[in-house]
Amino acid sequence: RPGVGSTYPPDFPASSPYVTAVGGTNFATKSVIGEESTWDCGGGGFSDTFARPSWQEDAVTNYISKATAAGVLPDQNLWNSTGRAYPDVSALGGQTNPYCVGIKGGSFGGVAGTSASCPVVAGIFAQLNDVRLKAGKSPLGWLNQLIYSAEAAACFNDVNDGSMNNCNKGTVGFAALDGWDPATGYGSINYSCMAGIINNF
């Protein structure tokens, strides 16, 4: 991640429309499982290479309109307003409450970051695939069009607190607002909701 230069450089491969990009959140209150806020180092933005796909056009356009009206949108000469926007979803990844994992030798340590939130999301979708397989359906495959569908988009815990600036302190980042945003995507997955609809696809 090169940091901010004359523009906001997008991450790759997260900015590819063929990748499901995962951002990071923190618990809003330390050690309390509940509401989430944006992890400011989670990563997000707009591709300079890939045009915005049709399946996310409405969600991203709505964000740009709301952020403009609220006065929280970074200067548009810093980012590509027509590019593929990311992340798509998020999971707990901040350092307020790291995941506790066992380490060789019997000790324990905390891990955090999108390197932690990505496998969490992968595991959730693996469980959703299991729901489908038990119903005699095929695995989900490529997820992005599903995520941005109205039915699936309602099955996320929306994160609308904080902003993401790719760890560049002092830089105006993308604010988390209601609905999809380039700070946390649609937010974290509500598994019970998603499991209830996943066989509809």
Image (spheres, rainbow, N blue to C red):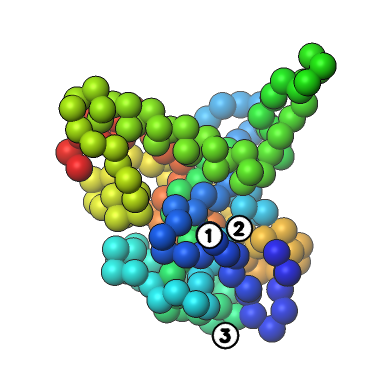
Residue 175 position in % (x across, y down): 55, 61
Q: Residue at x 69, y 24 (%)?
A: 101
Q: Earlier in the sequence, mark 1 or mark 2?
A: 1
Residue 175 visible to an observer of this rendering: no
Q: Is residue 152 above or below residue 110?
A: below
Q: Amino acid at mark 3?
A: Asn
Instruction: Determine contact: label 3, label 1, CB under 8 Å.
Output: no
Label 2, on which residue?
43
Label 1, on which residue?
14
Question: In the displayed image of the protein, which residue is found farthest to the top?
Answer: 106
Instruction: Determine contact: label 1, label 2, CB under 8 Å.
Output: yes
- How much space separates mark 3 and mark 1, taking CA atoms? 21 Å
Residue 128 position in % (x across, y down): 34, 31
What is the number of the mark on residue 77? 3
Q: Residues within 10 Å of mark 2 (few under 14, many from 20)?
A: many
Q: Is residue 116 left or right of residue 35?
A: right
Instruction: Identify the element where label 2 is drawn.
Output: loop
Q: Residue at x 67, y 54 (%)?
A: 41
